[in-house]
Image (spheres, grey):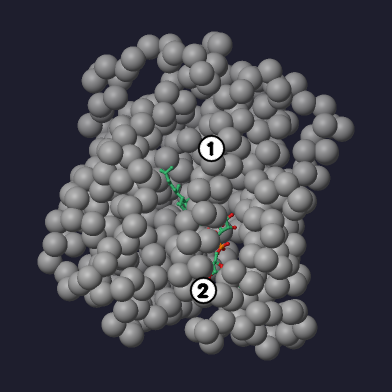
Amino acid sequence: MAYPRGSRAPLEFGGPLGAAALMVLLPATMFHLLLVARSGPARLLGPPPYLPGPDVLWSPRVLLLWLAWLGLQAALYLLPARKVAEGLELKDKSRLRYPINGFQALVLTALLVGLAVSAGLPLGALPEMLVPLAFAATLTAFIFSFLLYLKALGVPPSALAPGGTSGNPIYDFFLGRELNPRICSFDFKYFCELRPGLIGWVLINLALLMQEAELRGSPSLAMWLVNGFQLLYVGDALWHEEAVLTTMDITHDGFGFMLAFGDLAWVPFTYSLQAQFLLHHPQPLGLPMASAICLINALGYYIFRRANSQKNTFRKNPSDPRVAGLETIPTATGRQLLVSGWWGMVRHPNYLGDLIMALAWSLPCGVSHLLPYFYFLYFTALLVHREARDEQQCLQKYGLAWQEYCRRVPYRILPYVY
Ligand SMILES: NC(=O)C1=CN([C@@H]2O[C@H](COP(=O)(O)OP(=O)(O)OC[C@H]3O[C@@H](n4cnc5c(N)ncnc54)[C@H](OP(=O)(O)O)[C@@H]3O)[C@@H](O)[C@H]2O)C=CC1
Ligand SMILES: CC(C)CCC[C@@H](C)[C@H]1CC=C2C3=C(CC[C@@]21C)[C@@]1(C)CC[C@H](O)C[C@@H]1CC3
């Protein structure tokens, strides 16, 4: 997004105060969820069962395990890729190149973990380490963001993100100053967005499933569903890895604490909340209900995938026969906006599909507790906020054409409601 010379991007997230509060609140929420999920009452809004002391949080052995995980994912990132994709054009007119080997990393990780488990690695012990692992990930995110902040002090202005250069160190530390921090061809933001956290999330889910099998003889149907749905989601993200290159995280946001913590700690330790809950609070689930939940997930996935693929196909080649017949609005940038098909129904059909899936991930946990619905509630807030940020950016990019799009497609996420 371009801003007039001399002007600065408007402050987001409540400015420096909001950023400071989020840096405390986000880790605190994550630890709260981890502790409450294993407590008897499992009350989302109740106090945690205890406040973890340094002996619970800190373990050099667990820190080493965490660093080994990051090292393994970095090594897999560096393996030869089936394809190298180009990112969007940068301010200096150059384009960065990105390896497309995320799905390969997922498969190789699964093979390595399978081998290690058959050689006696007690994967079922992982759930007991979640709190110190989350602490190691949080510590890494803070240190990493600090190093990224320092690195950004030495780069040319063209390498800075539009939003993270307010001059306020707290705000810029949170949002991230440099747009695409790299060492040689290793892109830190792209690596973190898709690898250690997302693959770590499915590994934690699997460990919870294995521990449930150890405890109760076999994993419950609810645990199978949560594992299956979330594996599909992560597998899909890595299969369509190239699509992440056009998200606002890569094209607009700097790499600071928000994304470092979000990618490395928040995703694996809070997105696995349903499986954590199920390990400690088994839920009966009959076949008819399980089938209905599978249908809801399939509907969400269908909308999510078709909408994302339609836009990606259109952005790659508007004359592709699959999208050539769709109605469009021309914009002053030369690009067009889809105004029929999925993107003519609501302005963010992919968010709608994602939210339906989020609901399907919570339903196997029953309705006796609010806790497993945390992801759905948080995700609704995240997408509503993200949608507002995206609207601002699109209005800036496309001006009148965007206003015309909003007039023709008045609903944002949910038809006739929002
Ligand atoms: N699980 C999680 O925690 C999260 C999941 N997600 C998911 O990731 C995916 C990507 O999300 P996100 O990057 O936020 O946003 P989108 O994929 O919705 O991308 C928004 C961009 O699409 C383009 N666009 C918008 N409307 C149109 C149109 N009518 N025609 C053509 N292009 C249009 C614009 O960019 P341009 O014109 O420049 O191409 C706009 O900036 C989504 O499926 C989302 O649900 C996102 C965040 C978190
Ligand atoms: C810590 C804060 C609450 C904010 C953290 C935000 C991050 C967790 C998310 C920002 C954008 C994300 C995307 C994905 C995962 C979550 C984060 C990193 C996906 C990779 C999820 C799978 C989708 O298919 C693509 C998503 C792109 C954006």
Label 1's element? helix
Query: Callout 2: few (<14), some (14-19), or many (20+) C-alpha neighbours within 10 Å?
Result: some
Depth order, front residue of 66/134:
134
At a point 71% along the width and 50% down the height, the residue shown is 414
Q: Which quarter of the picture shows residue 249?
A: bottom left
Query: Residue at (44%, 13%) from the top-left corner?
Result: 47
Q: Amino acid at mark 2?
A: Gly
Residue 379 position, x and y percent, is 56, 42
Q: Position of residue 344 (x, y in %)?
A: 73, 67
Q: Quadrant of the N terminus?
A: bottom left
Which residue position holds label 1? 378
Q: Look at the numbered disc 1 and say if its residue's Cβ is closer than 8 Å to ligand 2.
A: yes
Q: Residue at x 47, y 56 (%)?
A: 389
Give the amino acid type for the residue marked by disc 1 in the picture. Answer: Tyr
Q: Is 408 situated left or right of 56 in this image?
A: right
Number of residues whose C-alpha sits closer than 10 Å to that of mark 1, classed few (under 14), some (14–19) or many (20 or more) = few
- List x then y, in percent, for residue 416: 76, 51
Say which residue label 2 marks: 399
Is the residue marked 2 within 8 Å of ligand 1, measured from its CB?
A: no
